[in-house]
Amino acid sequence: MDTDHHRFFFAFSIGFYYLVDKIEESIRPRYMETVEESMNDTVYVLSSLIEQELLKHPDIPFQSNINHVLGDSFQKAKEKNFEAKIFSHTKRKIDLEFYVTDAKGIVLYDSSGRRTGEDYSKYNDVFLTLKGKYGVRSSKLGMSDAESAIFIAAPIYFKGKITGVLTLIKPKTSILPFIDYAKEKFYRISLLVAVFISIVFCIAVYFLFSPIRKLSSYVVALRSKKRPSLPNIGVPEIRELGEQMDQLVREIAGKEYVENYVQVLTHEIKSPLSSILASVELLSEDPNRMETLLQNIQLESKRIQTVIEKLLELSVLENVSSLEIQTGLGMREIISETVASFAIEADRKKILLNISIQETFLDGNRFFLMTAFRNLIQNALDFAYANTEIRVRTGISGDQNWFLEIQNEGPNIPEYALTRIFERFYSLPRPDTGRKSSGLGLTFVFEVAELHSGKVEIYNWDKGVISKFSLPIRS
């Protein structure tokens, strides 16, 4: 999903860069068009002034009329000192130039004095205007000049005919500061817009994909055979999808669980039932063995009862996705009460229960924790040798987890069985009777540890087995 984020953001970045680049490229042409439009107005106004002067004084030479109308005024304007603050640019002099040609394209008057007498009939501004078209060009001001300028021309009419051409000139260097300022401002705004869009994008991604990621993690946890609760999802559509998915998963899991439950129960009850039926048949054939056979029937019946009770406990636990948690449970009181319930059995087997418990208060489910501790102690008693000691102690580990450790003296667990001891119905024969248990006690302990975000470990030591049940300490 993160890869999709990156691809989308990368594609968006390319698109945004392309947009910014195209707009930036259009800034200069748009400014030039604006300047050209303004110059066009100006040159036609000036050409109209010359036309009026020609009508007033038709007997005066053309060049004299031009000088009278524009020459003196233009020179005085160029000599003026002024300071005009135009946005970020300060203008201190007039940078306009102009020249006037006759009907043959010969320059009669030039405001800079450099072009007078030259033939400009082949330049587009003059050439096109003399043909009655719009005359404009962009060229260098002179052969030795590095800077270019905009040339806008307008016809000068006298008695209905084009008698000359007036060309207005503006160096592009006077326009560049405005273009640069516009580009700089555009880049600043683009950067702000990009940052804003990125922030909005990140927020949108978080609020949109965070629920999807939660839902994905929930599904992964379900596939791992965990029992997570449905996460809190803020987006209504995704929350509804999650609820439907959760319902579907639970229906499928419930169906599989019932099928598995029936198969397991049938398998585990089949053996003791067969034993009971065999005992009943022998009882009718050989009444002298009544006492022995009745004891066997009673023993196998208790085994069936134990399997059913343990399965019922485990089925309740396995269908719980979250526990009802009580806060501030005193571990000393819970463990002391649990150990005390085994006093008679331990005394009968001549086993000493050595207790070393620190007072610690934790959050958890009292009933399930006590049942798990009882299963661990029962397991330690079942596999302990007579006339030995079982040590029960608590403490805080280096990773700040509370633990209960139960150590007995008895046979080690075979290497092949260490990885299977938490499997349902897996059991080893007891050293004193040779009989197996229901094989559900340690499975129950494992489930309780999982639901409390803890863990349970069972491993060998020199003289027996150690069981360790750990729980996180929450502040």
Image (spheres, rainbow, N blue to C red):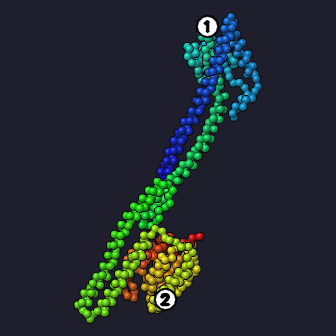
Residue 159 tag number: 1
Q: How many marks?
A: 2
State whether residue 133 appears in this view: yes
User: Between marks 2 and 1, how big is the CA–CA gap?
Assistant: 134 Å
Task: Tell me the SS state at disc 1.
Answer: loop
Q: Is residue 259 above or below residue 375?
A: above
Residue 343 tag number: 2
Q: Is residue 229 above or below residue 56?
A: below
Quarter of the figure with residue 216:
bottom left
Residue occupying the point 52% across, 79% down: 404
Specify whether 158 is left or right of 342: right
Q: Amino acid at mark 1?
A: Lys
In the rendered image, residue 356, in percent from the top left (x then y), is placed at: 55, 84
Residue toward you, 93 or 48 = 48
Q: Is residue 331 above or below residue 89?
A: below
Disc 1 crowd rating (10 Å Cα; few below 14, some 14-19, many 20+) is: few
Task: Tell me the SS state at disc 2.
Answer: helix
In the rendered image, residue 35, in percent from the top left (x then y), is placed at: 62, 26
In the rendered image, residue 70, in percent from the top left (x then y), is placed at: 70, 16
The reply to whether discs 2 and 1 touch (Cβ–Cβ < 8 Å) is: no
In the rendered image, residue 386, in percent from the top left (x then y), is placed at: 45, 90
Specify whether 54 is left or right of 279: right
Disc on the earlier residue, 2 or 1: 1
State whether residue 99 appears in this view: no
